[in-house]
Image (spheres, grey):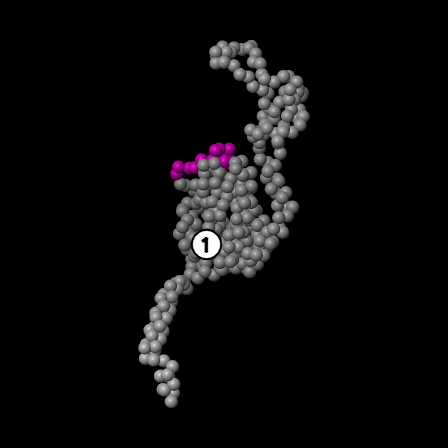
Amino acid sequence: MNEDRLSDALTPDEIEALMTTVAGGLAGGEVATNTAVAYNFKKPNRVSQEQMRSLHRLHETHARSLEFAFSTLFRQITDVSVVSVVQLTYEEFLGSLPSPTCFAVIGINDHKSSLALEIDLDTIFPIIDRLLGGRGTKLTTKRELTELEWALADRVIGVLLEEYRKVWRPVRDLDFHVQVREANPSHTQLVGPNELVVLIILRVEFGEISGTMNICFPFVSLEPLLQKLDLKNWLVQEAEEASDDSARAMRAHLDRVPVRVEAHLGDARISVRNLVGLREGHLLRLNVSVHDEIGIFVNGIEKFAARPVSRAGMKAVRITRAAKGAS
């Protein structure tokens, strides 16, 4: 009786069509299964994507703070940006570094945790040249830093770590200090070769120089911080932590930036014939009166009006008003 009911429900052609559909569905399922992403159990990504985005955001803040600090230290406008934040093994990190280089092991708080900082020679030598009053030129030969050069490099590292401490403050108070300086990174064993690390690559640009600085944060040192490093909370904390300290630090950096101030006494238009005939004692009549105001320019932009005066036997100007349209 059941067979009669089945035959009434489905004809042989309908049963064949149903089996074809099921077979096609299985085949489609197999194709979808083949698109699965391979997972490497030997090198797992132990830092989640959300935590990686939070780390990227934190180091973008660090890069912005370094722009002000480095511009003051180098006496030149400096751009700092985050190139990438990636996970890899410590062995892979060491294999990517040149030798010699500027490499330092940085202790964190109680010496139980640490990270590594590397500045390539094409970056650190132009910086040292700037600190010594030069234009920031690269060395043509690769060599280790001298003791004097290491002392200057320590100033750069100190500025970087001070700004690093500030950006970590909303998450946790950290004290960074140099433990070891080394020209050959392979001589240091920060963690085991197969241990996971997070590598932050910063690009530093000033003048015609473009180089990199690498921060290598072992996962064992980073793990306690990741629990507090939530992207949404970080963004809220970052906004709340735009405190008076940050504002004062920014103002302090800007206060030390040198500017060029010029007093424009006037213009004169003469022919080339008269120009080549100028001699000592000749007078040029300018297009302003001795009673007129003159323009005061700051870095080529007119900011004030003033009148010429004499002060303690020196020529000077007395500011009378702000220039029209000056802000």
Measuring from the top left, give residue 203's x and y in whole percent.
47, 45
Tally of numbered tags: 1
Magenta segment range? 129-141
On-image quarter of the N terminus: bottom left
Measuring from the top left, give residue 71's x and y in whole percent.
54, 39
Q: Residue at x 59, y 51 (%)?
A: 238
What's the residue type where badge 1 is placed? Answer: Val
Height in image: 190 above or below 130?
Answer: below
On-image quarter of the C terminus: top right
In the rendered image, which residue does mark 1 sit on? 86
Front-most of residues 242 and 255: 242
Say if the magenta span includes residue 305. Answer: no
**From where the camera sits, is residue 133 visible?**
yes
Q: Residue at x 32, y 77 (%)?
A: 13
Height in image: 273 above or below 45?
Answer: above
Give the quadrant of residue 12.
Answer: bottom left
Asked if residue 16 lies left or right of residue 254, the reply is left
Element on which disc 1 rests:
strand
Front-most of residues 326 and 120: 326
Within 10 Å of disc 1 (Cα), the crowding (few <14, some 14-19, many 20+) is: some
